[in-house]
Amino acid sequence: MRETFFSELRFSVNMIGVYGYRREKGLPGVSGTRPGETDEAVRTEIIETVRTFVARDVTPVAADLERTDTFPERIVAQMRDLGLFGVTIPEEYGGLGLDLLTYIGVIEELSYGWMSLTGIVNTHTMAATLIMTHGTEEQKRRWLPSMAAGERRGCLSLSEPDAGSDTRNISCKARRDGEEFVLNGTKAWVTNGERAGLVALAARSEEGISAFIVEKEPGPKFEGISVSKNVSKLGYRGVETVEMAYDDHRIPSANLIGEPGRGLPQILGVLEVGRINIAARAVGVARAAFDAALAYSMQRETMGKAIGEHQAIQLKLADMATRLEAARLLTKNAAERRAAGLRCDVEAGMAKLFASETALELATEAMRIHGGVGYTTEFPVERLYRDAPLMIIGEGTNEIQRLVIARGLLARARGQG
């Protein structure tokens, strides 16, 4: 297995000309003042590297790939070489071992260039987080190294056709049969489902909803698993979103994660990382929309001057910039609390709620500032406008986020938080 990039990280160009990180032997780790905290200089360097990668290798091709709904094989291979599938996985399991603040910085940069790329990373990271948080040592050593290297990509499978926000209505069954579980049921909205090698699955066992890791070969069918539907979407194109059917598919009982019947709280805990990721994605889309609007306002002229000199446009730009900064700070606060081991259900919900609404608002305002050309495929604004609604729905709708926030606030006020 190739060497991946881990102790002291240094900006470099690898043999195939892709920006990456190399381990410098004998140098100290990347931790800052707190255990697990990434040094600020290293974090900045990594994020700048991803920004360079996006500008050079993503932005020039994103529109064409998105328009044809083509999976970005070459870009994903470069992301693998950058180590982006192992950002938060500890070094002892082959990952970069970086903190959540670094991760959301990487996600923002990827989303700035093409939001779909973040879905490929995020569902993988949530599956890895489930293993890191609730898996046994044997399970961690069995699965995390190949996930960190990007050799096996993961996905999270919670929703079903009749169980979206109502997660307790999950009907996919896991029946114990000796040293195996037999899986039957259909799962919906599975990002990466066809190309994944590992599926973090929620299924109903005798004890209740349990979490499992399902190993499979990438492709539309593997043993008792089949991709029954590939969903065509408004935006978020270039990455598959599928329904997956399980028909008497057998997995070892050793693939159960944590205690049986405890899968739902385990996965909902992982969704806190997912919601912070959604917020970071939204910040990336919002920033792209704002930058596009600002640039166009300085180029487009009406009535003898740039439209940015007109007060009506200035008011829009001021509001856009303010909401963008507020979204970024809410996202950072949620990530800091999660990284510090503090409860962050409220903060993650706030970040996801506000940032996603901001992304849609800024994409809409950017289209208005562009006028008629913003409605064409010649400018990226229309893609941002189509991508933004995903963040309002994904990882729990914003209506659910408001309930999570309110219930969390009430619980804390009663002294139960």
Image (spheres, rainbow, N blue to C red):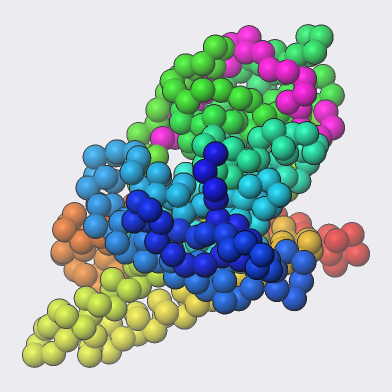
Residue 196 image offset from top left, x and y in percent = 51, 32
Viewer can see residue 248: yes
Residue 301 image offset from top left, x and y in percent = 12, 83
For the view shown, which residue lies furthest in the front direction?
Answer: 26
Q: Is residue 339 above or below residue 321?
A: above
Number of on-image labels: 0
Q: Residue at x 77, y 20 (%)?
A: 253
Q: Residue at x 56, y 70 (%)?
A: 43
Residue 192 image offset from top left, x and y in percent = 48, 35
Quadrant where the C terminus sits is bottom right
Majority secondary structure of the magenta segment? strand
Quadrant where the N terminus sits is top right
Task: Say left or right for 303 vs 66.
Answer: left
- Residue 224 sits in quarter: top right
Task: Say left or right for 33 vs 287.
Answer: right
Q: Nearer the viewer, residue 142 or 179?
A: 142
Viewer can see residue 396: no
Q: Residue at x 40, y 61 (%)?
A: 13
For the view shown, which residue lies furthest in the left direction?
Answer: 304
Task: Say left or right for 350 vs 175.
Answer: left
For the view shown, which residue lies furthest in the right direction?
Answer: 415
Write the start and end of the magenta stretch as one range.
240-260
Magenta run includes residue 18? no
Task: Say left or right for 205 vs 229.
Answer: right
Residue 377 image offset from top left, x and y in percent = 19, 54
- Residue 366 sits in quarter: bottom left
